[in-house]
Image (cartoon, helix red, strand yellow):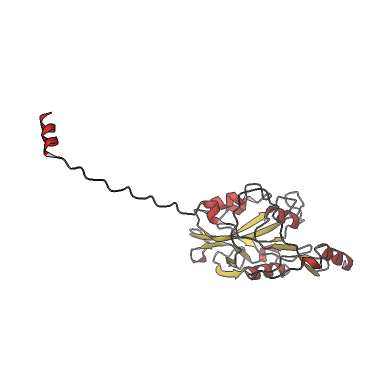
Amino acid sequence: ETARGIAHGLSKGTATDAWYPSSAGGRPSRSSLVWGDGRRYTVDAPAAVPVAPALPSVSASSAPGVRLTFYSGRRARRGHGERMPWGDLVDSIECAAPPPRGGKDALELWAAHELENDDNHRGRVPVAMHALFLDYDDDPSFSEEAVAYWWGGYQWVAHTSMSHMVEKKGVTCARGRVIVPLSRPATPEEWPQIAAWAMDGSRGKVGAETAEFCRMYYRPAAVDGYAWWSRDGGAVDVDAICGGDEPPEEEPPPPRTPIQITTDIADTALRS
C-alpha cells in the first residue's frame, strides 16, 4: 500500500506543478481515500481542467462560504442554520467520522435549504437555497474523474455515500454526492429552474430527489472505501440561469407639442 500511495502521489504532478495560494485566499484542490485498514491517504489534486460539455458559461466568482441547515437526526424536523466557510465544509467532509453504532439512521443530516425558523415540519415555508446538493445513486461512473468532467470549472466537493459499492435494488455500484455553491441565495421560485439546469443530463445521472427543496441529506461517514475529492472554481451563477438581470426601464415618450387651433381653422370646421 505504501508503494501504491507513493506512485499515486507522484502521478499527480511534478515539482514544476507547485500550487500557490490564490489572491482570493483559496485552498488547494485535494483528494482523499480511506484504505481498508482505516488509514487515510490525502494528496493534492491537479487544478481542474475545463473539460465539461460545451455549455453556456454560468460560473461566477468562487463562494467564500455556504449557509447550511443542520438536523440532529432523520426524524428531527427543527434544524439550526449556520454559515460555513467553504474550507471548513471541505474539512468536515475530509475528516468524516466513522458511522455511529445505530448505523445510517443515526447520522446527522444537513441541507443547503433555508426554511422559515429552520422548521421542516408540515406547513414549512421555503426561504432560499444556498447550494446544489446532488445525489449520484444511479450513475456507476461516479468517480473523481467523472465529477471533474461533469463540473469542470466550478467549485465543488464530492464524497462517496454509505451506499457506495453496496447492493441497492439489485445493483452494486459507486454512489456519492456532490456539493456546488451558488453565486447568491436562490428564491423558491428560481429553484426549479436551477435544479432542472443541474439535472439536464449533461452532468451525469443526478437523482430526482435533488429537485426537492426541503430534502435533508445524511452527512458523510468514513466507512471502508470512503473517498472524497474537491476542486476550486466558480460558483453556479444564479442570475445567468434565471435571467436575474432586470431589463432596462423604458424611456418615457417625448412630450407632445400642443397644437394651436386658429380662428380660421375653427370657423372652417364649423362651416363644414
Left or right placement of residue 64 versus residue 8 in this view:
left
Q: Position of residue 118 (x, y in %)?
A: 52, 65
Q: Residue furthest right?
A: 3
Residue at 59% in and 54% down: 58
Q: Quadrant of residue 65?
A: bottom right
Q: Quadrant of residue 257?
A: top left
Q: Position of residue 22 (x, y in %)?
A: 66, 69
Quadrant placement of the N terminus: bottom right
User: Residue 203 versus residue 82: which sits nearer the camera?
Assistant: 203
Say if residue 183 shows up in the picture.
yes
Residue at 66% in and 48% down: 54
Q: Position of residue 103 (x, y in %)?
A: 71, 64
User: Residue 41 versus residue 244: which sits nearer the camera?
Assistant: 244
Say if residue 124 shows up in the picture.
no
Q: Position of residue 97 (x, y in %)?
A: 72, 70
The number of callouts visible is 0
Left or right placement of residue 232 versus residue 83 in this view:
right
Quadrant placement of the C terminus: top left
Residue at 73% in and 63% down: 228
User: Residue 153 versus residue 157: which sits nearer the camera?
Assistant: 153
Left or right placement of residue 272 versus residue 30 in this view:
left
Residue at 65% in and 51% down: 207
